[in-house]
Image (tube, rainbow, N blue to C red):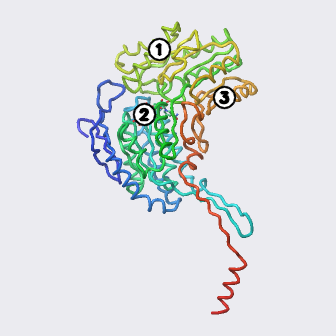
Amino acid sequence: MSNGVITIDNYIGGSFVAPGANYLDVVDPSVPGKVIAKCGISTAKDVDIAVEAAKKALPAWSKMTIKARAAIMMKFHSIIQREAEDLARMIVLENGKNFTEAMAEVAKANETVEYACSLPQLAEGKTLRVSSQVTCEDRRLPLGVVASIVPFNFPLMVPMWTLPIALVMGNTVICKPSEKVPMTLRRVAELAQEAGFPAGVFNLVNGVKESVEALIDHPDVKAVTFVGSSPVAEIVSTRCRKLHKRCTSLGGAKNHLIALEDCEPSSAASDICVSFAGCAGQRCMAASVLLLVGGEVQEGLLAKVVELASKIEPGSKPGQMGPVIDEASYKKIIGYVTDAEKCGAEIILDGRPWNKKEGCKGNWIGPTIIKHKQSSDKTMKEEVFGPVLSVYSVSSWEEAIAIENANPFGNAACIYTTNGGNAEWFLERFRAAMLGVNIGIPVPREPFSFGGLYGTKSKYGDMDITGDAAIEFFSNRIKVTSKWPITQSRKRSSEAVAGS
Ligand code: NAD
């Protein structure tokens, strides 16, 4: 570290190693232009070095008992718990979310670590006794070296969706952090070392497009997980598919919340507010579109959402909201608000003036609520990835579901109602894979897996991430059919005994 600026090197074979190419500035999202770290940019040669280290570590790691691997993971779990506040502070610094959100991220990340510690109990194969002599057996074996490519919005939680499960299943791992937030994972490498992961079992290769392509193309990388924007998720999935490589690739989202007349307005309002403004809207599970069914009655609910959102102040303390990640993101979000305005939408809560507040120069935009006049507005349809809620009034349930179904993403959707039958009507019809009833952020908990709907822009590749899908993803099923002629072998051994 010099002048408080941390150098982020690769972590390969248990040591920090400088990459062959250059370094990129990592900028504090709260203070434009303030460089907080220099993130290494890896070439294909750096990727080769990492893959070699991961390959070298593989035989010993995969031959350890699963309980021995889980025991190291348990140590890692307790170290993360011990370091939770420091990790959260690092997340606040490089990502910009508030401290409470960062602590929640650390806790959620450690839930997957905890799940991975249970794999000796959960990751069994299966056996079928076909006859008295024939048995079919399904053995789970590790894939080998696997790669995980992650986005900026959860510097710790998203990497932990894959790494702990891949590791306990006996694979060795190379993770490519987001170049915008590489500091937290650098610290995690130190903590993994302390936990006792052997050298080469867990590696970090920093970089951008070239590093990702080299990881996918490397013949010794057996599977790839990707989480990020839809265009890149599609590129990664297609590239893996061409190489017949196992891949799970999660993309962006546009989550619709539908509030019926019979919803409980005060809990719905606070839930909707947390869903769209939490983490400055930079969550793939964030509410993007609120569809109000019921005309005038719903004005009260909307007023409550606006009232709660307008109380949010800029900052990193609990209840406050941080900036968005960078200038490009900020400009994109402002563009969507301006575009909606041009389409005749009413900006009922305008977060754009935040930028003029003391200490909020740069990437700060406050909670913004837009009341649209037509559902065809671009801002209603594309992923904004900022603290912006599009609101639109519909006249029927059918109209609400038609709008939700027409969106090209299929990540999450939620219905607010106090009637179970009404909820079921929507659950049967939503075109999304993570559904909520009176919950704006319906994140499934392990052992359930996380992921959007196949065939939409939210999910490409083979399967979901985390939970039981990850056990499947990170193992090869080897099918063994055995036939043991029991009577004959007894005869032979008794003959052998008699002859001795
Ligand atoms: P991004 O797609 O820009 O980057 C994700 C990763 O891909 C990074 O590590 C980046 O370095 C790498 N990358 C960028 N361009 C690449 C290219 N052309 N080729 C290969 N690799 C490339 O995403 P982001 O901005 O970091 O994250 C935000 C996005 O992630 C949003 O769209 C959000 O919805 C999505 N996201 C989805 C989920 C989910 O579970 N579906 C979870 C978190 C975030």
- Image quadrant in which the N terminus is located: top left
Labels in figure, total: 3
Which residue extends farthest top? 344
The answer to the question of whether label 2 and label 3 lie on touching residues, with beta carbons closer than 8 A, is no
**Mark closest to the chain's N terminus, 2 or 3:** 2
Callout 2: helix, strand or loop? Answer: loop
Is residue 313 visible in the rendered image? The answer is yes
The answer to the question of whether label 2 and label 1 lie on touching residues, with beta carbons closer than 8 A, is no
Image quadrant assignment for residue 262? top right
Q: Position of residue 303 (x, y in %)?
A: 59, 12
Q: Foreground residue, 3 or 432?
A: 432
Q: Kindly identify which numbered label has been placed on residue 437.
A: 3
**Marks 2/3: CA distance?**
28 Å
- Image quadrant in which the C terminus is located: bottom right
Q: Nearer the viewer, mark 2 or mark 3?
A: 2
**Marks 2/1: CA distance?**
23 Å
Q: Which amino acid does label 2 sit on?
A: Phe
**Mark closest to the chain's N terminus, 2 or 1:** 2
Q: Is residue 314 above or below residue 142?
A: above
Q: Kindly identify which numbered label has been placed on residue 164.
A: none
Ligand 1 is located in which of the four quadrants?
A: top left
Asked if the residue at label 2 sits under 8 Å from ligand 1, the reply is: yes
Q: In this view, does 16 lie above or below 31?
A: below
Q: Is residue 288 above or below residue 456?
A: above
Q: Foreground residue, 101 or 112?
A: 112
Question: Which residue is denoted by mark 2 in the rendering?
Answer: 152
Q: Where is residue 444 in the image (x, y as percent from the top left)?
A: 60, 37
